Image (cartoon, rainbow, N blue to C red):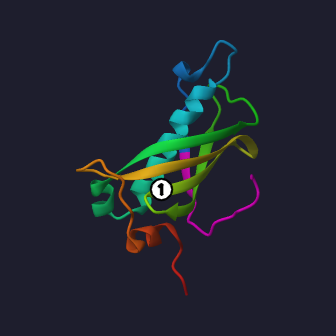
Amino acid sequence: MTDIVTSTAIPHSFPIGIDPADIDFMGHVNNASYLKWVQAAVISHWQRLAPADAVASHLWVALKHEITYRKPAFLNDEVIATVLLEKVQGARAFYETIIRRGEDVLAEVRSSWCCLDAETLRPARLTESVIEHFYPPRD
C-alpha cells in the first residue's frame, strides 16, 4: 500500500504533534493514539479542500479503521500523516492515510467514513461539485 497511488485525489499532509500522554508503558506511542491522529488528519483534509458551505453543513463519523503498524513512534519524532481520498460512494468516503517519520512508514491506515447532514445527523450524499474539490482539475 505504501508506494502505490491508487487514486488521483489531491493528497493532504497533516503534521502530527506527539504529546507525552501518547506515550505508553513501553516508551513509544500507544496504538490508540494513531486513531486520534487519523481522525484529525481526515477532518483536516475535509476542512482544507471542501467548500466552506459544505464544511458547515456536513459532519463525518468513522465507520471502520484498519491499521497496519510498521514501526514505533517516540515522543520527539517529527511525524506526518498523508491523507488520500480513495473514493466516495453514496454517503461514504474511503481514505488511505500513511503515517511517516521521514522516509519510515510507521503505519498504514485504511478507513471508511459516513457523511452526515449537520442538522438532521442523517447520512448525506455529497454532490459531485463538492467531490470535485478533492481531485485536480481536468484538462
Position above or below: 100 against 56: above
Q: Which residues are magenta?
A: 1-14
- Residue in the foreground of this view, choosing between 89 and 81: 89
For the point 56% across and 52% down, the residue is 13
Quadrant location of residue 68? top right
For the point 45% across and 68% down, the residue is 131
- Residue in the foreground of this view, choosing between 139 and 115: 115
Residue 94, position in %: x, y?
A: 55, 55
Image quadrant for the C terminus?
bottom right
Position above or below: 126 against 120: below
User: In this rendering, would 63 be left or right of 79?
Assistant: left
Q: Given the current orientation, which residue lies at the most extreme top position?
A: 25
Q: Given the current orientation, which residue lies at the most extreme bottom position?
A: 139
Q: Is residue 35 magenta?
A: no
Tally of numbered discs: 1
Residue at which label 1 appears? 92
Quadrant location of residue 124? bottom left
For the point 60% across and 20% down, the residue is 23
Q: Is residue 6 magenta?
A: yes
For the point 43% across and 55% down, the residue is 46
Residue 31, position in %: x, y?
A: 63, 27
Residue 55, position in %: x, y?
A: 33, 56
- Residue in the foreground of this view, choosing between 63 and 26: 63
Label 1 sits on a secondary structure element that is strand
Position above or below: 90 against 67: below
